[in-house]
Amino acid sequence: MLPSIELQGNFIQSLISEAREKGYRTVETDSDVQRIWAETVQAISKVTVFDHVKSWIQNENVEGKQKYSAFSLAGLKTYIAKLNEESAASFPSFVTVK
């Protein structure tokens, strides 16, 4: 978890820096991109061991919560590649307002 937290922090810092440079007042994730990402994360999670065990990674440590993976389980290299791709393309998955 720690390497991904550092990656996410750096990614967010880059996004904020670019937003400031371009004079954006707001930055939000595109809702369609967000939905597709969530579906992808869930599909990947379903083929891992986490789909077969009770785990906090799937929200199963809280009574009544729906089973849901909040983590990309496709591997750190894949996650790094996705973040790098997004940054290199100037954050196309985000909607901005000047």
Image (cartoon, helix red, strand yellow):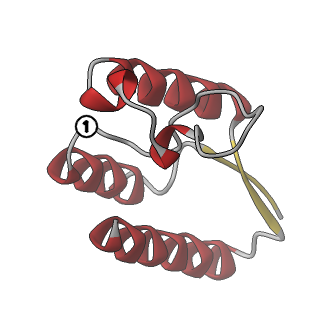
The quadrant of the rendering that contains the N terminus is bottom left
| Above or below for 91 versus 98 | above
Residue at figure coordinates x 47%, y 24% from the top left: 42
Residue closer to the observer: 3 or 13: 3
Does dot 1 land on a helix, a strand or a loop? Answer: loop
For the point 69% across and 44% down, the residue is 62
- Corner quadrant of residue 47: top left
Q: Tell me which corner region of the image, top left, top right, bottom left or bottom right, holds residue 5.
A: bottom left
Residue 6 percent coordinates (x, y): 37, 77
* Residue 59: image location, x then y, percent: 59, 41
Q: Going by the image, does 4 lie left or right of 78?
A: right
**Lateral position of residue 67 relative to residue 96, left or right:** left
Q: Nearer the viewer, residue 31 or 17?
A: 31
Query: Which residue is depicted at the point 43% across and 24% down?
Result: 40
Q: Is residue 85 above or below residue 63?
A: below
Q: Quadrant of the C terminus?
A: bottom right
Q: Position of residue 8 (x, y in %)?
A: 44, 67
User: Can you identify the residue that label 1 sits on?
Assistant: 74
Three-letter residue code for mark 1: Ala
Seen in the picture, residue 17 relative to 93 is either above or below; the reply is below
Residue 65 vs 18, above or below: the answer is above
Judged from this view, the residue extending furthest toward the left is 77
Could you tell me residue 27's position as x and y percent? Answer: 74, 60
